[in-house]
Image (cartoon, rainbow, N blue to C red):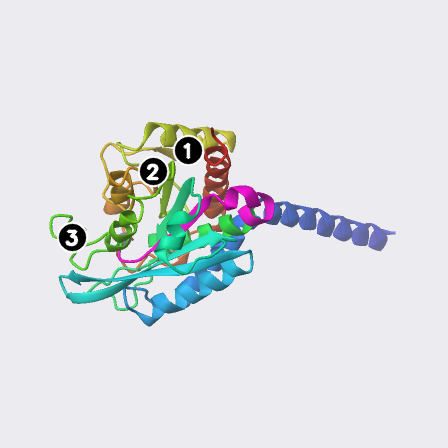
């Protein structure tokens, strides 16, 4: 009898554990998928402009997106940098475009919103294997997961969205310096394509450092108010508004030139990165990020996209 009770108890425990695991897994499905994409991007190695690692990451992203109906094209350009002339490549994706082989064709497609992140990793003297897991492979990984689900659940909205994986966000000198044009190479070149679009996209979202295991987001103080309100509404809806807020100052990041080109753009970026022990340091690896945080960033961004892409 005792054995039967023990067996029954073990079975019950197994069922409870199974349900617990299933619930955990189910609630973080998107986070786990984005986590796996981050690992795959990091497996390419360092991704500074012109590197084999960046090419490898482009191939991975293009292949993943293609499985869900997204086509990709490259915007290639050369720029002088503090370490000499370099070639940069922005990767741009659209959902089921009629054609997508030139910037002129791209500009003809209806675009209500832009979803973007930088794919390059910083070239850091003394850290040859710097991978930039949260800066910003995790954000690019999140875009893959968002794009897959938009295509699956909201194909009409996906048609209105342009995805951009920027090259050259990172400066070759220690910090981004707009006075000499070091850093934001990709977003500056991409922003030029926005000037003559008619109509202009009505919003942009930049994701950067959105997978940190202690997720705290602080958007630039001068963020477009309607986009900040949309982010906070979305965060509140998911019960995560305590993790989202505003920095006390502006931030120089890829949103800068999109705003200058007349597309109101918000930079959803991890708080306090410049004072952290990991930013542009060895510690920016997979240990820093979590599927749970990526899941939160997924849901907040997806709800924003659903709202902003359907707004009159
Ligand atoms: Zn960086």
Q: Earlier in the sequence, mark 1 or mark 2?
A: 1
Seen at 36% across and 39% down, the residue is 200
Magenta stretch in the rendered image: 150-168
Residue receiving disc 1: 231
* 182 to 233, vertically: above or below: below
Task: Locate residue 184 relative to residue 20 in the image: left or right.
Answer: left
Q: Secondary structure at mark 3?
A: loop
Residue 123 seen in render: yes
Q: Earlier in the sequence, mark 1 or mark 3?
A: 3
Seen at 50% across and 46% down, the residue is 159
Nearest to the observer: residue 273 or residue 50: 50
Residue 189: where, in percent of width, then height? 26, 53
Residue receiving disc 2: 266
Q: Secondary structure at mark 1?
A: helix
Residue 44 seen in render: no
Task: Locate residue 99 relative to residue 51 in the image: left or right.
Answer: right
Are the residues at dot 1 and dot 2 in contact (C-beta closer than 8 Å)?
Answer: yes
Q: Which residue appears farthest toward the right when viewing the image?
A: 1
Indicate the quadrant where residue 174 lies.
Answer: bottom left
Seen at 17% across and 52% down, the residue is 175
> Does any atom of ligand 1 lie closer than 8 Å to the CB of label 1?
no
Q: Secondary structure at mark 2?
A: strand
> Does any atom of ligand 1 lie closer than 8 Å to the CB of label 2?
no
Q: CA distance from mark 1 to mark 3?
A: 30 Å
Nearest to the observer: residue 281 or residue 100: 100
Nearer to us of marks 1 and 3 is 3
Seen at 46% across and 40% down, the residue is 301
Q: CA distance from mark 1 to mark 2?
A: 9 Å
Residue receiving disc 3: 181
Nearest to the observer: residue 77 or residue 124: 77
């Amino acid at each position: 009898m005792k054995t039967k009770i023990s067996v029954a108890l073990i079975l019950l425990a197994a069922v409870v554990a199974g349900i617990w695991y299933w619930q955990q897994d189910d609630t973080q499905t998107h986070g786990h998928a984005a986590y796996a994409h981050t690992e795959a991007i990091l497996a390419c190695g360092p991704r500074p402009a012109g590197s084999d690692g960046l090419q490898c990451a482009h191939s991975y992203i293009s292949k993943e997106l293609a499985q869900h109906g997204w086509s990709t094209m490259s915007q290639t350009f050369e720029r002088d940098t503090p370490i000499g002339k370099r070639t940069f490549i922005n990767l741009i994706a659209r959902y089921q475009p009629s054609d997508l082989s030139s910037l002129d064709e791209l500009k003809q497609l209806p675009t209500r919103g832009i979803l973007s992140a930088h794919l390059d990793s910083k070239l850091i003297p003394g850290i040859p294997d710097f991978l930039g897991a949260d800066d910003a492979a995790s954000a690019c990984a999140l875009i893959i997961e968002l794009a897959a689900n938009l295509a699956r659940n909201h194909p009409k909205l996906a048609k209105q969205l342009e995805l951009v994986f920027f090259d050259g966000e990172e400066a070759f000198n220690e910090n981004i310096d707009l006075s000499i044009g070091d850093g934001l190479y990709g977003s500056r070149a991409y922003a030029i394509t926005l000037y003559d679009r008619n109509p202009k996209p009505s919003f942009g979202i930049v994701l950067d450092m959105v997978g940190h295991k202690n997720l705290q987001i602080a958007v630039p103080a001068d963020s477009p108010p309607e986009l900040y309100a949309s982010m906070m509404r979305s965060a509140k809806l998911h019960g995560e508004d305590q993790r989202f807020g505003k920095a006390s100052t502006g931030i120089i990041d890829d949103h800068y030139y999109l705003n200058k080109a007349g597309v109101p753009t918000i930079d959803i970026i991890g708080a306090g990165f410049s004072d952290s022990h990991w930013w542009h340091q060895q510690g920016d690896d997979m240990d820093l990020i979590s599927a749970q945080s990526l899941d939160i960033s997924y849901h907040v961004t997806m709800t924003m996209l659903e709202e902003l892409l359907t707004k009159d």
